[in-house]
Image: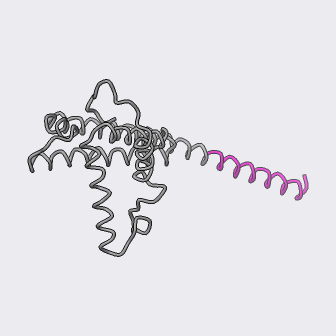
Amino acid sequence: MNNSSWKDYAEIIGITAIVASLIFVGLQMRQDQEIAQAQALVDASAVVTDLNQFIENNKEVWIKGLDGAELSLEDNLTFRALCRANYLRKIAHWERAKRLDVGNPDFIAQSFAFEIHVYPGLRRYFDEVIESFEEQMSAFGHTRSSAFGHTLSDDSFTSAVEASLAELDRNPPPPPKTKSYLIN
């Protein structure tokens, strides 16, 4: 065999090794993504379990708050903490669906909008969150779309919920036959 043949074989072996390593890296990346998706689901399950325990420990406040009943200052604080935990869980669920392609982000926003529509206390909380955010941003000369690090832009969970809520307000569905008082 002459030098040219050895050189050709070496190049073929080198190219084959590069292709094999790229395939391996691709498989490893896919496996890492699958592991991340599975871990996200496990983490979400743990959050739901903790949140359900928080609600269970404060179920009277939760039910009265969702119904829009008048609450004492202490109970209102507990209700708002429960709402905030649910709201942040929904945001995380929506983000996970968008980033990891696990679930439908539009359905998550629509589901939360429906829950806000059904429960007057949750609606009041959601409206207060929006108003508070806008007041904070206004104090620093920002608008919803220019807020630094945290926006309520068109691609945010909150904006998706607001759009779905506006649709429900325009075309209200019949109320559910029973209220579960669980925010999915």
Residue pictured at 38% horizontal, 30% vertical: 174
Q: Quadrant of the C terminus?
A: top left
**What residue range appears in magenta?**
1-24
Residue pictured at 41% horizontal, 50% vertical: 162
Residue pictured at 45% horizontal, 44% vertical: 167
State the residue lying farthest toward the front.
170
Taking depth in this image into account, of 177 and 160 the one nearest to the observer is 177
The coloring applied to the image is: one colour
Residue pictured at 52% horizontal, 42% vertical: 101
Is 1 on the left-hand or right-hand side of 95?
right
Magenta stretch: residue 82 in it? no
Quadrant of the image occupied by residue 54: top left
Q: Position of residue 166 (x, y in %)?
A: 42, 47
Q: Position of residue 88 (x, y in %)?
A: 32, 49
Taking depth in this image into account, of 79 and 131 the one nearest to the observer is 131
Quadrant of the image occupied by residue 119: top left
State the residue lying farthest toward the bottom.
141
Magenta stretch: residue 19 in it? yes
Q: Position of residue 144 (x, y in %)?
A: 40, 64
Give the vertical position of 172 relative to 22 (above or below). Answer: above
Taking depth in this image into account, of 161 and 39 the one nearest to the observer is 161
